[in-house]
Amino acid sequence: MTSRPAAAHQHLRDLVRLRRVRDRMDREYAEPLDVEALARGEHMSAGHLSREFRRAYGESPYSYLMTRRIERAMALLRRGDLSVTEICFAVGCSSLGTFSTRFSELVGMPPSVYRQTVAHETDGIPSCLAKQAGRPVRNREVRDTAPVLA
């Protein structure tokens, strides 16, 4: 049986590892990342990483990574100089269909519609404010209406 101090110490070590995994996803969102590779980098099993990541951050590593990719895609769509397909690949997605589906789930509209509507609503707004106002919403938080920019 594991003692309480040892278990607490292990939990803190896991949190440090999870933070490194999350930071890596934030930095390398456009790279081909998978749970097995992320876990291997921290000397953890994929199952343990997934369970502990969900416990710490409230979502799976895949969901977290896709949200980062969609946030970056939103910024690129607001910029307006790349096609949706180019943006899909630029943010690390390998399937336009999966990218568009996930974008629609998180943002409430397809990427092309986002570009046409929301992107124009943010003209003249500093990018840091536009990013915050248009932050994607994870599945469990989805509202019945599209995000409204103030």
Image (cartoon, rainbow, N blue to C red):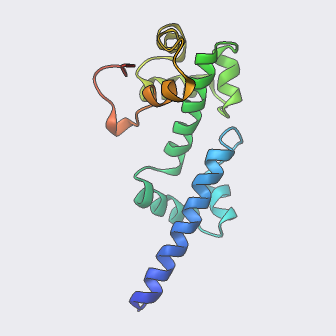
> Residue sitting at 65 percent across and 41 percent down?
29
In the displayed structure, 124 sits above or below 55; it is: above
In this orientation, which residue lies closer to the viewer: 102 or 18?
18
Quadrant assignment, res 106: top left
Spot occupied by residue 85 in the image (x, y as percentages of width and height): 67, 18
Spot occupied by residue 93 in the image (x, y as percentages of width and height): 64, 32
In the displayed structure image, the side of residue 35 where residue 142 appears, left or right: left
Quadrant assignment, res 146: top left
> Residue sitting at 51 percent across and 9 percent down?
120
In the displayed structure image, the side of residue 81 where residue 78 appears, left or right: left
Spot occupied by residue 136 in the image (x, y as percentages of width and height): 45, 31
In the displayed structure, 133 sits above or below 78; it is: below
Spot occupied by residue 113 in the image (x, y as percentages of width and height): 49, 10
> Residue sitting at 44 percent across and 17 percent down?
109
Quadrant assignment, res 90: top right
> Residue sitting at 40 percent across and 52 percent down?
58
In this orientation, which residue lies closer to the viewer: 72 or 50?
72
In the displayed structure, 12 sits above or below 59; it is: below
In the displayed structure image, the side of residue 116 where residue 95 appears, left or right: right
Q: Quadrant of the N terminus?
A: bottom left
Q: Quadrant of the C terminus?
A: top left
